[in-house]
Image: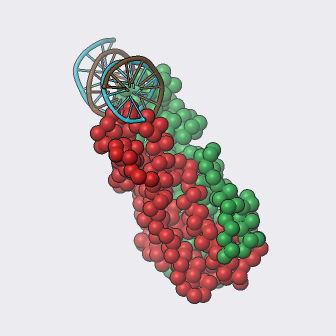
Chain colours: A green, B red, C cyan, D brown
Amino acid sequence: VADDPPGTQRRLVEAARALIEAGGVESLSMRKVAADVGVTPTSIYWHIGSREALLHAVLDAMIDDLPRLRVRGTTPVARVTSLARSMREHFAATTRAQQLAQELGRGAELTFPAQVALAREMTAAGLRGPDAAQAVRAVLYLVGGFIMIEDNYRHRQPGARTTQELWRSVHDESVAAELRSAMARPADTGAVFDYAVERLVTSLLP
Amino acid sequence: VADDPPGTQRRLVEAARALIEAGGVESLSMRKVAADVGVTPTSIYWHIGSREALLHAVLDAMIDDLPRLRVRGTTPVARVTSLARSMREHFAATTRAQQLAQELGRGAELTFPAQVALAREMTAAGLRGPDAAQAVRAVLYLVGGFIMIEDNYRHRQPGARTTQELWRSVHDESVAAELRSAMARPADTGAVFDYAVERLVTSLLP
DNA sequence: ACCTGAACACCGTTCAAGT
DNA sequence: ACCTGAACACCGTTCAAGT
């Protein structure tokens, strides 16, 4: 495991990772990576093999540095809720790795630790049988939804209209006026998250 | 609104749409679109302006053809649950449009009709005030989570391990053996969806 | 008004050739 | 074993030129 003197392969992966962390997967090109290391693009093919293989190597490195999930509290509801919050923060802090994993079809690997942590809490809460699996999956989906929608919002085009803006032009009487104006205001995502998770978890646990 | 005799612009958008519907956004190239219409790539720039403008035109056409959401049932819980199911089907049936909208940062436009439909049902169920907005958002997030995770699963790499497969190698005693083997079996996504939505909606409605 | 041809600055990848 | 140079088949886009 000693680093061989030239270590071109390691330097290539590091350069690729730096590019991805700075500008996402789409900003990586073989020619840029090569230039950053001071080598010809073609030599990457000798060391790594292909663009895809390079991306996999970068993802492996990122997975090694992933932060851990936190669980706090004493009651089952409090513990699962705190874990859900930690999952959300965890995702927000590792978007580049998530994007890369998604692109490489390796998303499952990154979600898995959260599944296990959730399953542990459900077991501790006394849930057994098929209901336990359904409870794990239900929480997983709810948290995933937050992550997706927040991500959607983050990656919107500068000019594109948000749903908040779209709500301003709704005058449909079948939606309460109060609700229409609430939807037109920015959501306190953290509060909605806590609210939704707590409601769901409370209804899932015995 | 009469179609002008040559109609090259219309034919370009149609060719682009066909390419995207067949192989996703990444399979579209200006040169292919041009070839399909029988014209030089450069002439697209005269008619449409850029690749991005072409994609926006295709998305506009797709939005015009979007199917409608269905709501069935008489009790509020049944109606919201059926709407949620319809949202999930709707998404699955329009993945190309969703992918394109996401890429163009116009995801909000496609989610919006579902928000309004949900808000209508919450109003009909008698929910008012800030709780109504939180309820709309909570259901939205849960459904979004299903969509994201199902999408994730669909786009996994042939070789990549699924979470089910990963569960087989977990022998952690803090997770009940029964739960471990349940997580290693394929999930009946439809059943989990109905279960989770019904639980959440029941706990949200008065 | 509509389209072409040539050109520019990029891609990922292969492969024979060098040391 | 490691790297280069030349080449191939692609990209999106610009712009002067044609009809």
- Where's residue A45, x and y in %? 36, 31
- Name above or below for residue B113 compared with residue C15: below
Residue closest to the eye, B37 or B79: B37
- Where's residue B144, x and y in %? 56, 64
Could you tell me if residue B111 is visible in this image?
Answer: yes
- Where's residue B81, x and y in %? 56, 79
- Name above or below for residue A87 compared with residue B6: below
Q: Residue at x 41, y 26 (%)?
A: A41
Q: Residue at x 45, y 57 (%)?
A: B62
| Quarter of the rendering occupied by the C terminus of chain A | bottom right
- Name above or below for residue A40 compared with residue C18: below
| Quarter assignment of residue B120 | bottom right
Q: Is residue B179 left or right of residue B41?
A: right
Q: Residue at x 43, y 34 (%)?
A: B46
Q: Is residue B30 left or right of residue B130?
A: left
Outermost residue, bottom side: B74
Q: Is residue B136 left or right of residue A191?
A: left
